[in-house]
Amino acid sequence: MVGGPRRRLSTEAVHAGEIHDASGAHIAPIFQTSTFTFDDMAAVEARAAGESDAHMYSRGGNPSRAALAQKLAALEGCGLAEGEAGAEIFASGMAAITAALMGTARAGDHIVTQQVLYGSADHLIADVLTGFGVTNTRLPGLAPDDLEAELARRPESAVVYLETPANPTMGLIDIAETCGIAHAFGVRVVVDNTFATPVLQRPLELGADVVVHSTTKFINGFGTVIGGAVVSADAELMAGEIASLIRFTGGVPSPFDCWLTNLGLKTLPLRMERHCNNAMVVAEFLESHPAVDSTAYPGLGSHPQHDLAQRQMDGFGALIAFDLGDYGTATRFLDRIELCALAVSLGNVDTLVEHPASMTHAVVPAEARAASGITDGLIRISVGLEDVDDIVADLDRALGG
Ligand SMILES: *Cc1c(COP(=O)(O)O)cnc(C)c1O
């Protein structure tokens, strides 16, 4: 759309990237095809000369994937100039994170990241990328003074990688402040925005160079797809390294998965509103329950970074971490929940509850888990869209209330 005021986020969620072709179909078909035909060699030549954006083969690109990429770029880029942000869609969040890091750091480069990370991202940085000559430093909470000192000490630093809110402890990082420090050293900032989604937090507006997502979570929202995305306003990076990595490492999503995710994304603003409202009620219930030792939710006044949450986010999300003190008590609780499901993943319409130390973060060595506050009594809940009274009743019963 050229001219006129920029459309708001909820409108972009419904309309951006939608395909309206000659068939008149209101909802785009699923382009379930591996290859694309050309009318003649002139069409092939036009594509080769960059005069047409016709698709040729679905590993390189597919309309279902392009539609989802456009919608997600419109949401993450809502506060930027029209069309400034671009996105690429991957077969999983991990494929997207791998592409974002391989696209911004190469052998000999250094990554600085926080202590507490999503378990598989932790493993990728600590054990996989190191095998390709990319080293790393872990700084608790990416504390600004420590970050500045580390970037000064390691001139080979190429990327600061961060997650906020952090999984599973719900610690926050100031994105704008981190970008200010990193950019002074010519270092790029990559932000995993899975927990917040563009509805609650838009890192590109705050100065981040690259946003990554596990679209498996809130963006799809219904628990039907594994997927990921890289979003950036750096057109050179997107057309260069990221386009090259998806094409030549081949971690592409199926057209059907893109179609399902695109459908889910349309209701993201509405779902996030209900997720946030329900989670606030659940967090207040947990905080006041005598069987719960501690509750971490950015929306609670007791969260040590509540002020930052209010500044940086447009809502506090669906994820809450709470501690029941020890493994036995946590196990008893998890065995007793009925409405809430004992399952990893998050951001679904259903409420999901998990035990990080033995599930999502089991790949993190025990000492590192302890240093990160991932105790044996810690539980993570992703509050769903059920009636909040039913969620609270289930938790209350399982807590023995
Ligand atoms: C799930 C998740 C990932 C990994 O995404 P997959 O789609 O499972 O590959 C990365 N970061 C965060 C914060 C996640 O929750």
Image (cartoon, helix red, strand yellow):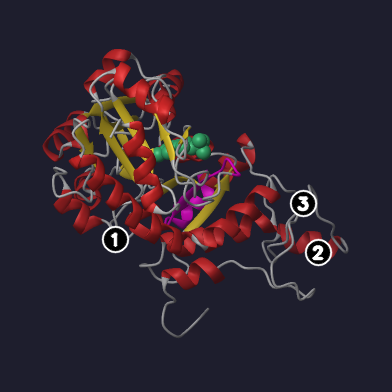
In the rendered image, which quarter is residue 188 located in?
A: top left
Image location of residue 308, percent across then percent down: 17, 52
Q: Judge whether residue 129 is colored magenta.
A: no
The residue at the point 38 percent across, 61 percent down is 273
Q: Label 3 crowding class (10 Å Cα cut-off): few <14, some 14-19, many 20+? A: some
Q: How crowded is mark 2: few (under 14 residues within 10 Å), some or many (20 or more)?
A: some
Q: In this view, does 196 lie to the left or right of 297?
A: right
Residue under pointer 3 = 32
Identify residue for label 2.
Answer: 43
Number of the front mark, 1 or 3: 1
| Residue where numbered disc 1 is placed | 314
Magenta stretch holds residue 231? yes
Q: Quadrant of the C terminus?
A: top left
* Label whose residue precedes the other's in the sequence (2 or 3): 3
Residue 173 location in percent, x, y? 23, 44
C-beta proximity under 8 Å, tags 1 and 2: no
- Range of residues picked out in magenta: 224-241
Q: Earlier in the sequence, mark 1 or mark 2?
A: 2
